[in-house]
Image (cartoon, grey):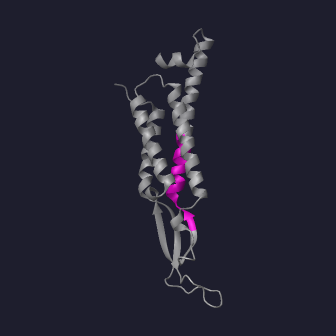
Amino acid sequence: MRGLSWTSGVSLLVCVLGCALLFVPWVSASIAYVEPTPQSDGTYKAKSMPAAQEVPAYRLWQGVSSAAAFLGVAVFLVVTGPLRPDPWWRSAVVMTVGAAITAAIVLGMSHPPGELQSDLEMGRLVFGLHWEWANYTALGCAVALMLVAALELRRSIARAHAAKEFGGTGDLTASAGA
């Protein structure tokens, strides 16, 4: 049984890191609780001092979906790893999943979780919302996955072009079995 190519190995490591990020905070904010009814002068009476609250990725839809996608790519790479030369379709799948992870994370960042939104009727005031390092690391992992897949795809295209130029068929599917 053959091992993984260097591009598949790097992609697998990136996927393991992406899965591990499921258990660390992705977003945090300071939350204070106030009386739900305003005072006569329009201000709210504080019930508690602001306290920091962190939300790990497993409580966010984009965290769970990106970890599941990273895990799916990791399994896909292990299953298709022994194929030589690296088939073009493996790179295309990995690149597509990397783009989907990137889109999910960016979309999730544009819509903060409901538990970190102010609700004066319930007496909750949220301020200082910011995305943690793990969120950006997951985004970087998704982009790295796309870049490594692009390098692998580039190699497959160059191999097919060389085969066509030197008398082969130049068919990408034919080069996958060679």
Vertical arrangement, residue 136 with respect to residue 76, above or below: below
Span shown in magenta: 129-145
Image quadrant holding the N terminus, namely top left
Q: Residue at x 43, y 34 (%)?
A: 76
Q: Residue at x 55, y 81 (%)?
A: 36
Q: Is residue 137 magenta?
A: yes
Nearest to the observer: residue 115 or residue 168: 115
Q: Is residue 169 magenta?
A: no
In this view, which residue lies farthest toward the top? 167
Total marks in image? 0
Residue 97 seen in render:
yes
Vertical arrangement, residue 64 with respect to residue 117, above or below: above
In this view, which residue lies farthest toward the bottom? 40
Q: Residue at x 55, y 50 (%)?
A: 139
* Side of 54 where 165 appears, left or right: right
Residue 12 seen in render:
no
Provide residue 3's location: percent of width, then percent of height.
Answer: 38, 29
Taken as a whole, is the magenta stretch helix, strand or loop? helix
Provide residue 19's location: percent of width, then percent of height.
Answer: 43, 48
Provide residue 127's location: percent of width, then percent of height.
Answer: 58, 72
* Side of 123 where 4 appears, left or right: left
In this view, which residue lies farthest toward the right? 41
Provide residue 41's location: percent of width, then percent of height.
Answer: 65, 90
Nearest to the observer: residue 68 or residue 139: 68
